[in-house]
Image: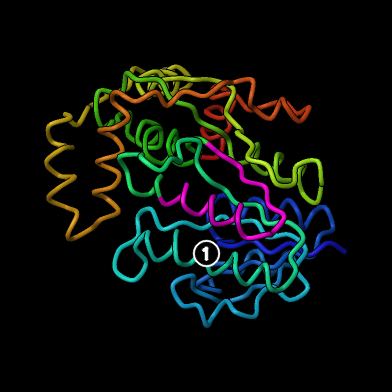
Amino acid sequence: MTHLLIIGGTGVLGNAAAIHFLGKGFHVSVLVRDKEKAANLKMKGASVITGDLTDAATISGIFNGIDIVLTAAHGMLGKGKNKSVNVDKAGHQHLIDKAKQAGVKQFIYTSTNFASPDHPVDFFRTKYSVEQYLISSGLSYTILRLPAFMEWHAYNLLGKNIVKKGKTTILGAGKNPANFIAIKDVVAAVDTIALNQHYYNKIIAVSGPQNISRNEIAELFGKALNIQPKTGHVPVGVLNVFSFLLKPFHPGIARIMKLSLHAETADETMNTRDSIEQFGLRPTTIEEFIQSAIKKQ
């Protein structure tokens, strides 16, 4: 039986991946900071391991018998000991070292399509740094470069308030198109590449099927609800000021402000031919996602 270890089993990706692979008969272990939050996964048959990426001692022995590692944890919004540099860089480098020592067959690292050594936002520079660390580690790896998750960026941060209150607030003008992907499509991609040597030692971009602005997403939520949503915008000047003022107190929120500033002018689109269609699978459209999200309420 293939043994899969998911780093960060209680997040949207980790939880969905765990449930999917349990259903396929995998032995699934999840590394979590709070085992109580993983109670549903334990009930479904997952092995729950308590550990913290900021504490190397808690993750040293977790790779014994593991075939595949899937990373689904990050510290983009973290502060204090959970700040990004501790979780996303040092923590993941330690994971890679220990996975190599244990003889893990495939290390699947979830990165971002915009990872680069000179990105203006530190989180994306860190992602690039860890990609390079993994490539040079000697492990068999697959790096998935992903866009924003629909569940977070299209729903939680935008559409949720439209569904519940008929209004939302967008950081910035919301006019610049970006790419969004559904979590189930990420899981489908992982399923395809798991222990498939054709995908070893590759960086693979996996996009959503559309490039669309946040204003357009708000309109689609309104259309699906048959309402005209009230959409407010946080001006770029305010984002700029708070990206500096908040950094000493909450670097995670300051990072979001800076990223939103960057998104005003940056090209955050992706080649939609890189969707899960490249694996012979059909991607979830924004419209389909919105209909599903509304039905769950």
Span of residues in magenta: 126-146
- Residue position marked by numbered label 1 in the rendering: 93
Image quarter where the N terminus lies is: bottom right
How busy is the neighbourhood of tag 1: few (under 14 within 10 Å), some, or many (20 plus)? many
Q: Residue at x 74, y 46 (%)?
A: 200
**Residue 144, how many percent across, how many down?**
61, 42
Q: Is residue 209 left or right of residue 187?
A: left
Q: Residue at x 80, y 41 (%)?
A: 198
Q: In the depicted view, which residue is nearer to us: 64 or 155?
A: 64
Q: Residue at x 56, y 30 (%)?
A: 289
Count how many numbered circles sit on residues in the image.
Answer: 1
Corner quadrant of residue 25: bottom right
Corner quadrant of residue 176: top left
122 relative to 28, above or below: above
Corner quadrant of residue 154: top left
87 relative to 188, above or below: below
**Residue 225, how many percent across, how many down?**
45, 22
Magenta span contains residue 143: yes
Magenta span contains residue 86: no
Under mark 1, the amino acid is Gln
4 relative to 265, above or below: below
Q: Residue furthest bottom?
A: 57
Q: In the depicted view, which residue is nearer to us: 26 or 85?
A: 85
**Residue 137, how many percent across, how many down?**
62, 60
268 relative to 259, above or below: above
Q: Residue at x 46, y 23 (%)?
A: 269
Q: Secondary structure at mark 1?
A: helix
Q: Is residue 87 left or right of residue 188?
A: left
**Residue 87, how many percent across, how many down?**
43, 64
The type of colouring in the image is rainbow
